[in-house]
Amino acid sequence: MLKSMRSILSSLLTHKIKLLSLVLFLTTTTEVASSFSNKTDRLALHSFRELIAEDPLGSLSSWNNSLELCEWHGVTCSRKHQRVVVLDLRGKLLSGILSPFLGNLSFLRSLYLQNNRFQGKIPLELSRLFRLQHLNFSSNSLQGEIPTNLSNSLSIISLSYNDLVGKIPADSFGSLSNLTYLDLFSNNLIGGIPPSLGNLSLLQIVDFGTNSLTGNIPHSIGRLSKLDYFGVGSTKLSGTVPPKLYNISTLRQLIISNNLLTGNLPQDIGLTLPNLILFSVGDSQIWGPFPVSLSNASKMRTLDLSSSNLSGPVPFDLGRMMKDLKWVTLGGNNLGSGDASDLKFIDSLTNCSKLETLGFNENGFGGVLPNSIANLSSHLNSLVAGRNQLAGNIPVGISTLVNLAALGLEENLFSGDIPFEIGKLRNLELVSFGKNKLSGPIPESIGNLTRIFEIHLDGNNFNGTIPSSIENIRGLQTLDLSHNFFTGRIPKIVGLFSTLTFMYLAHNSFIGVLPLEIGKLNNLQELDVSENKLSGRIPSILGNCLKLEGLFLEGNTFHGSIPPSFSSLKGIESLDLSRNNLSGQIPENLVALVLLKKLNLSFNNFVGEVPLQGVFGNMSMISLVGNKGLCGGIAEMQLPACPMSIKKGNRLGFKIIVPIACIIPCLSLMLLFVVFLRKRKQKNKSLTLPVIGDDFLRVALPERVMEIVDSRMLLEEPTEAENDAQNERVRPAKISECLVSLMRIGIACSAESPDKRMNIKDVIIGLMTIKEVFLGVGIHGRRQMRMRLTGEATKSATRGIDSTEDA
Ligand SMILES: *[C@@H]1O[C@H](CO)[C@@H](O)[C@H](O)[C@H]1NC(C)=O
Ligand SMILES: *[C@@H]1O[C@H](CO)[C@@H](O)[C@H](O)[C@H]1NC(C)=O
Ligand SMILES: *[C@@H]1O[C@H](CO)[C@@H](O)[C@H](O)[C@H]1NC(C)=O
Ligand SMILES: *[C@@H]1O[C@H](CO)[C@@H](O)[C@H](O)[C@H]1NC(C)=O
Ligand SMILES: *[C@@H]1O[C@H](CO)[C@@H](O)[C@H](O)[C@H]1NC(C)=O
Ligand SMILES: *[C@@H]1O[C@H](CO)[C@@H](O)[C@H](O)[C@H]1NC(C)=O
Ligand SMILES: *[C@@H]1O[C@H](CO)[C@@H](O)[C@H](O)[C@H]1NC(C)=O
Ligand SMILES: *[C@@H]1O[C@H](CO)[C@@H](O)[C@H](O)[C@H]1NC(C)=O
Ligand SMILES: *[C@@H]1O[C@H](CO)[C@@H](O)[C@H](O)[C@H]1NC(C)=O
Ligand SMILES: *[C@@H]1O[C@H](CO)[C@@H](O)[C@H](O)[C@H]1NC(C)=O
Ligand SMILES: *[C@@H]1O[C@H](CO)[C@@H](O)[C@H](O)[C@H]1NC(C)=O
Ligand SMILES: *[C@@H]1O[C@H](CO)[C@@H](O)[C@H](O)[C@H]1NC(C)=O
């Protein structure tokens, strides 16, 4: 009994203990659970922070242990559980990679990391964030694919401006039933637009633009009845635009430009899409007549219908109701019919007081520019009307458009003068009047247009001279006056246009010389003054225009030789000097212009040997016809062989800058030799050295040996002592050989780095040897001489004497 009582008691007691321990256990587990979660968030954020390489704004400085997690900058916690629900570090310029631990922030609803510099992949672990609603990673440098299985709670996914690849994950995106905002603009995504997106009935913003997506726009997209923005511009999409897309009346912005999409624009589009503010179909194959109803889309701000295949007239009342219109581009279609009323729609655009851009170029518009153009918005900054059949004068009223920066009227039938009032358009930057029938002079008032950087007046009937006021246009980059009747000189003030890149003055009647000031144009890439009446020498200073790629001087009366300085034009691709009165030898150093693809020297008076290398090695790149005195060259040229002497002298193609310190002793030694040479050759003054100036040191010695040497010396009659047939041929060769050797020494002295220069002892030995050779040691002396001339520079120079390959 007692025993039983005890046992009951004991069992009760154990029960109680069990109960107690259970309670105890329960309390500890709940405590553990809570602190565990707390720790998880903390661990996750620590890991996130650890992988941030740079925090230039110090945005994470508050992320330390002395502050509660929930007080950290950018962190918001839920009140109840003290768990992280928002992580917002947008625009902090953070770089690094995204920690997979972010997937442990299991209460997270919003993750805003846009406008940072995160790299690497989007962690797959983010798919564990089943409460996530807002995800914005725009404007980072994220790579890899878009993770699948993202939370079905998501309403915003913004991944634009990253480097994401792969496909849009069809299966998982198709089930994001709460998605309203899907922005994948500007990534490298491929594949198609998943048709399942048509199920996401809450979608309002969809942007897939600037990706490499292919395939069609799925018809299911037409079911998105809340769509506000749909962008598929600059993709590789093809096929027909689903007509239902044009029926989503909520659409405000529709961008289907720049891809292979086709289909016609429904005539009632302005009624079915009455809320359009931005409509862009440019650069696609959309076709059909211009929809008259578009005028009813009265909220329109940006209308881009350019480079499509639209036809027919533009409705006269296009702009009547579009009070907010800023941008209209209709260029590159088949609009208009060459009719006088074609541009009547411009009258209606005078209602659009915010209009900034108006383009209707490359169409079939006829008639004249209406005077109403003067009443267009004063905000207008681009008026682009080129390549139509517009006739009549340029209306004076155009001068009221004081904010105009670009004015394009090229390739029309405009006639008459450029109105003097154009000088009022002080914001003009680009004037394109080429290929019209305009005439008269360039008005002096052009000098008031100081912001211009491009002027195209080519292919008109302009005459008169280049007005001096043009000197005020200091930022000029392109000046095209070609194919007109301009006269007078090319003014020296062109030297002021330090930014000038393209200067085309071809096919006019310019006279006088090429002003030396052109040498100041160190940005010049193309200079075309062909087919004028220019004369004088080609200025050597053109060699300063180091960026020249094309130089066209043909069809003038330039004389003299090709300046040796042309060897500095390392970027030159086309050089045309044909049909002038140029003479002298073809500078050997032109072979070093490796980019030269077209060289036309035809119909001049060039003489001497045609080099073999570089551009001269390819018949299709060069024209030399009509020069009677040329010899040598590659076999295909079928020129006569050159006499020995010319060959030797001409082989000196070295491009070495001569340091003053070395060249002066070398030159004095040479002068000694010259005196010696002169004594032997009484008859004529045989060797001349140009005045030593800066220019000479830079270019003359290596490149003008044959100019230094009076050529008569080489062809001179033999003295009595050498008066036999054999010597008559050998002599000039010997003299030339000595000169060449002499120059070798000079050049060896002039190597750019001092350790490559010859030492003075070797110089003297060399000179002595040359003397011996000249005095009759003869051809054997050459080897001896060569042996003594040691050193790298000399070796390569010596190789140049023997081998025709190298020069
Ligand atoms: C963990 O959460 C509790 C509230 O549940 C909070 O009082 C505590 O400060 C948190 N601990 C840490 C380390 O954040
Ligand atoms: C932690 O951050 C807070 C807020 O930025 C700062 O005031 C505090 O000095 C920091 N503490 C430590 C130890 O860095
Ligand atoms: C959090 O996530 C990481 C990586 O995804 C994982 O290794 C870790 O075990 C997770 N749990 C905790 C409590 O941090
Ligand atoms: C996402 O971030 C980008 C970049 O700052 C911003 O333009 C866009 O409006 C954001 N999207 C949402 C839905 O907040
Ligand atoms: C993620 O998605 C893939 C298919 O895309 C599926 O096989 C997998 O089971 C999903 N994982 C989770 C955790 O939902
Ligand atoms: C979608 O949003 C509604 C309303 O906010 C919400 O009740 C529902 O749970 C959400 N659906 C999902 C899958 O998260
Ligand atoms: C979603 O869309 C696809 C293709 O448009 C369709 O086959 C599927 O039945 C839809 N799913 C749901 C749940 O509506
Ligand atoms: C557009 O909507 C109208 C009226 O709701 C309807 O008659 C027409 O068939 C629809 N067009 C397309 C292509 O769905
Ligand atoms: C342009 O549209 C016309 C019909 O207006 C069509 O015949 C023609 O094939 C289209 N051209 C292109 C290149 O799409
Ligand atoms: C469309 O505009 C025209 C005139 O521009 C007007 O006569 C017509 O009533 C408008 N239609 C609608 C539906 O607003
Ligand atoms: C251009 O400026 C000059 C003064 O430099 C002025 O006399 C002339 O009227 C101006 N012309 C125009 C059209 O603005
Ligand atoms: C320019 O041409 C017109 C005829 O088109 C002529 O009257 C005028 O004298 C010419 N001016 C000059 C400077 O040649």
Image: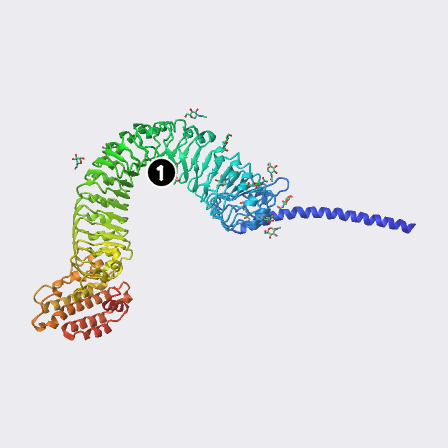
Q: Position of residue 802 (x, y in %)?
A: 23, 69
**Relative to the observer, which residue lies in front, 126 or 309?**
309
Q: Residues within 10 Å of mark 1 (few under 14, many from 20)?
A: many
Q: Position of residue 595 (x, y in %)?
A: 29, 55
Q: Residue at x 55, y 36 (%)?
A: 202
Query: Disc 1 marks which amino acid?
Result: Gly
Quadrant in which residue 84 is drawn: top right
Q: Residue furthest right?
A: 1
Q: Position of residue 237 (x, y in %)?
A: 46, 43
Q: Which residue is mark 1?
A: 332
Quadrant assignment for ligand 9: top left
Q: Is residue 19 visible?
A: yes
Left of 716 or right of it: where is 333? right
Vertical side of 378 occupied by 579: above or below: below
Specify the quadrant that holds the C terminus.
Answer: bottom left
Vertical side of 684 occupied by 83: above or below: above
Q: Position of residue 631 (x, y in %)?
A: 18, 61
